[in-house]
Structures are given as structure tokens and as C-alpha cells.
Image (cartoon, rainbow, N blue to C red):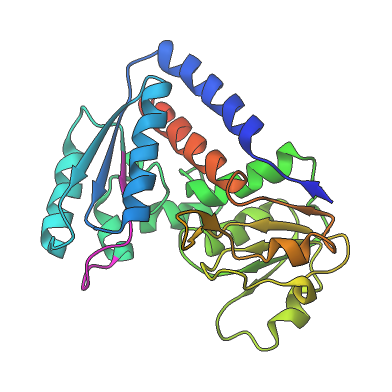
Amino acid sequence: MRKLIGKELAEAIRTQTAAEVAAGPRPRLAVVVATGDEASLWYVRSIAKAAAGVGIAADIVDLGPAARPEQIRESLVRLSADTGVHGLMLQTPLPPGASAQELAGAIDPRKDVDGASPLSLGRLAAGLPAFVPATAAAVMALLDHHGVELAGRRAVVVGRSAVVGKPLAHLLLDRHATVTVCHSRTRDLASVTATADVLVAAVGRAGLIGAGHVAPGAVVVDVGTNPTGDGGLTGDVDAAAVSARAGALTPVPGGVGPVTTALLLRHTARAANLP
């Protein structure tokens, strides 16, 4: 079984981004945070560190876990109007009563480097230029990097979130795959996923996908990042069980994650050069 590792691809993207940054205006990324979730805060810190490594300035706007929806919206509106900010993203989870999908509408689409706003998602669905949600884009980039053919193949995406599952389904359709999207109400999940040539798990439930969910030789992409009791991460795929059956599998960590961060920075660099 092949391991679809993301490290080499992420390094190549960062190198290219650093060259783009050096040739133009210094980009600035603002990340609005309103959570006390340690895993989320760790991810934000990792974005800031990676940004510094390629010459991008990163501002963490921490509103605290008690922030009200109107406070979050005001910050997004202010940063959208700030000409010194080129990229803007809203980190989840959010406090109770705050809807990420509603608040993302306050992000200027030209600065929406994580493709979260309804306008960005609508343009993606229509096949028009837009920033693509970084995780969905990372899945496609990783498949391309490892030479996985998509045209004419059956792809099954488990998960229908607006940041991964839905945009990824559109991206796969654009590459001429035959796409099925599964979710919490899909009956007999294994009978559907076992038909996939390419299976993507993006639910956020540790070990959801086992050997019985996977066709022999299938390519399996694990988007899940679930914290473990020892401070590590595990995916949505039971890697030990699936590795004996799949033809290829992304590791967690080290698969989709580093590519996601690298693409987020690339989007920020390119947003800084928009006319």
C-alpha cells in the first residue's frame, strides 16, 4: 500500500509562495478567533508560524470564547475594509449562537482565502474563479501530486460540510469523476463507500471508516483530525485495518494537513496581488 504523504508537496508550495512574496508586496493574513478550543488554537499558531516562514505577516485577532456574533461580524467587516489586510479567515469552532456560514458572508470575497463566504462557494459551484476552501483544494492537490487518475472513476465523499465535503464534490465533478456524497443519514454506509475507486473521509469521527468500507485497491484520503488522549491526532479512517485493503492511504498527521496550510498561504500571497 502506498502512503500519500503531503510533506514534499507542502514544501514545494511553500517554496513557490515564498518566491511570489519576495517579488511583490508583503501579504498580511488576519485570522479571527473566538474559541478556547486548544486544538483550534494550536492550528492557528501553526498558521502564523508557517506564514512567517514564507514572509507573510499574520495577525491573530483573538476575541475570546465569550464573543458575541455581532462582535465577530464587526471584526470581519472592519478587516475586510482594511486595505492593509490581504487575506482574512474565520477560525472555527465558534461560541454558541454564532453561525460560521452566516458570519462568513461578512468576509470580502477578494480576501476570502479559505473560500468560506457564500459568494466564494457559489462561484465554485458555478465553475467561476474563486478561492477554494483550502482543505478541499489540498485533497485535489495531493491526489494530483501522487498521480491519482480521477476522470471516469467513482469517487465517494463521506461528509457534506460547506468547507470540505460540498466543495470537494464540485472539484471532483470538474475533474470528470462520478461523485457520491454520503452523510449521517446515509443508509448502509459501507455498501456505498465500498464502490469507490477514490474514497474521502471528512466527518470528524475517529475510526469511522474500517476495512469493510473500502474496496480492494481503493485510494483513501483521510481528512479527519481528531485529538487523542495522549495529545496526538488520529483520522476518520482506521488506518491499521484499512492499510491491508487499500491501494493508497493518506496518513494522519502528515497527509492533507500540511498541504492545507501551504495552500492557505499561497491564496494569501495571490490575494495580495489582485488588481
**Direction from residue 48 to residue 75 in the image, left or right:** left
For image coordinates 39% across by 38% down, the residue present is 46
Identify the residue at image location x=30%, y=56%: 104
Residue 275 seen by the camera: no
- Dividing the picture into quadrants, the one containing residue 194 is bottom right
Tell me the residue at 57%/48% (across/down): 253
Residues 210 and 148: in front is: 210
Foreground of the two, 274 or 247: 247
Left or right: 70, with 24 as reference point:
left
Q: Is residue 1 visible?
A: yes
Task: From the top left corner, tell me how far across and down residue 140 is, in percent.
Answer: 65, 47
116 left or right of 239 in image: left
Query: Residue 88 at what x, y percent from top left?
Result: 30, 41
Query: Main SS of the magenta segment?
Result: loop
For this rendering, which residue is in front, 58 or 144? 58
Q: Is residue 91 magenta?
A: yes
**Splitting the image into 4 quarters, where does residue 184 fall?**
bottom right
Residue 261 sits inside the magenta stretch? no
Please identify the quadrant where the C terminus is shown. Answer: top left
The residue sitting at the front extreme is 230
Question: Which percent across, then down, holds residue 106?
Answer: 24, 53
Stretch in magenta: 88-99
